Amino acid sequence: MISEVMRHIRNYFQTGEYIDGTYTIQDGTIDLPFLLDGQYFLIEGSVLNDGVYQYPPFELDDETFTGTIVPLKPPKAFINLCEDIVQWVDKYGGNTVGPYQSESFGGYSYTRATNQNGSPQTCVREPLKRMEEGLMSLIENMMVPFCFVEKKRTPDGAGGFLSEWTDGAEFNAALTLNTTMEARKAEHDGMTSVYTVTTSRNIHLEYHDVIRRLSDGKTFRITSDSSDKMSPTVSTLDIAQSTAERWELTQ
């Protein structure tokens, strides 16, 4: 469940280390002396075991693989939320996975069972609402101030134009580095790092919008429309997501 929720919010809370190598899993466990007991970590590049685990693990499938170990540091509030989700799924499970007749977001979708009157079952409305509110609180805590950066062109007096960048409207967003194997391979091939930008639904980010993080002045260029990936309006989870790349302002 921890891995699923991390994937859903596109944030694995990585420490910034990516330890490549050849690893052997034997008798269901793996020796990783650079991790602390109880620390979470991500396996990428294996055949049988990609995912998030707590060290030391005992449930892995034996194999030898060349891949990456990513140490993680998820906050306690996030772990508690995932435990609540597990308890809720164990209690309700099956067809009662949400208070809505159907829902779709980011490639995930479901259609709920109905009662004899054809209305969605409501017995799990409050548990799901509490979980969505908890997840929304975590996302909001990750958000920091950004602003749009607008490009203006003025005549240069010689038949051409001068470009000038000015700060525009401010908004809050959470920016996380995409650490999937595909993204890391793209970086290795010379492409820029891929980021995920999470905002509320009322912030519309469009392809090639330029934004600036106010805390350090770093600029990023949007590479997908946020309107393509929004949580349903009936959901307590008020988020939209875009991809972005690190970008320097052109003159």
Image (cartoon, rainbow, N blue to C red):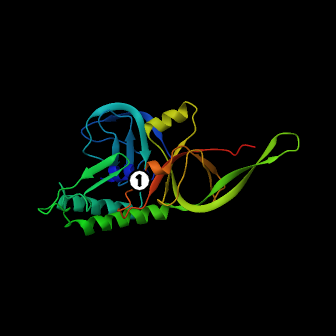
Residue type at numbered disc 1: Ile
Q: Position of residue 160 (x, y in %)?
A: 82, 40
Q: Position of residue 209 (x, y in %)?
A: 60, 48
Query: What residue occupies the far left of the structure in this picture?
Result: 116
Left-right relation of 55 to 225: left
Give the residue drawn at x 16%, y 60%. Answer: 118
Q: Nearer the viewer, residue 64 or 47?
A: 47
**Quadrant placement of the C terminus:** top right
Q: Nearer the viewer, residue 156 or 136?
A: 156
Which quadrant would residue 207 be assigned to in this image?
A: top right
Q: Is residue 2 visible?
A: yes
Task: Identify the residue under disc 1.
Answer: 9
Badge 1: residue crowd in 10 Å (few <14, some 14–19, many ≥20): some
Q: In the figure, 8 relative to 171: above or below? A: above
Q: Is residue 55 visible?
A: no
Which quadrant would residue 208 be assigned to in this image?
A: top right
